[in-house]
Image (cartoon, grey):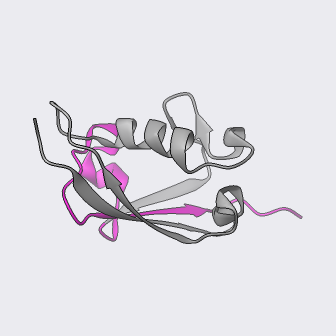
Amino acid sequence: MAASIALRLEFGGGAELLFDGVREHLVTLPGQSEPWDMKQLLAWIRGNLLKERPELFVQGDTVRPGILVLINDADWELMGELTYQLQDQDNVVFISTLHGG
């Protein structure tokens, strides 16, 4: 079984409102037989951190269009998106780019 991993999750651009207004979360994901990937992290966030209106954050197995995802300051599209295997001490940022008008 792989060791647990510690992550910093940050939410901005209004996305933090879905998480009781908390912008930064330091979380420890439990060890499991397979490495954690972004798809599993999104499911974990939905089940453990997301407080309201999940349809504004997730769509199916991924983030909703309009949510920019950065892994260690790099666009997750360059990192493999849902298949990126998380590493201990990774910093994952979710920024909503959608604004009401």
The residue at the point 20 percent across, 35 percent down is 32
Instruction: Identify the residue at image location x=69%, y=62%.
Output: 20
Is residue 7 shown left or right of residue 26? left
Against 98, is 60 above or below? Answer: above
In magenta stretch: residue 94: yes
Depicted 15 relative to depicted 12: above or below? above
- Using the rendered view, name the quadrant where residue 42 is placed: top left
Q: Quadrant of the N terminus?
A: top left
Rendered residue at 25%/41% (across/down): 36
Q: Is residue 93 left or right of residue 7?
A: right
Q: Quadrant of residue 41?
A: top left
**How many numbered discs sit on the rendered protein?**
0
Q: Is residue 65 left or right of residue 30?
A: right
State the residue in front, 51 or 15: 51
Residue 54 place in picture, x, y as percent: 67, 41
Q: Which stretch appears magenta?
A: 72-101
Residue 46 location in percent, x, y?
A: 55, 41
Residue 37 spot, x, y in % from top left: 28, 40
Residue 84: say if magenta: yes
Which residue sits furthest left?
Answer: 1
Q: In the rendered view of the protein, which quadrant contains the C terminus? A: bottom right
Foreground residue, 33 or 18? 33
Relative depth, front residue between 10 and 79: 10
- Spot occupied by residue 99 in the image (x, y as percentages of width and height): 77, 63
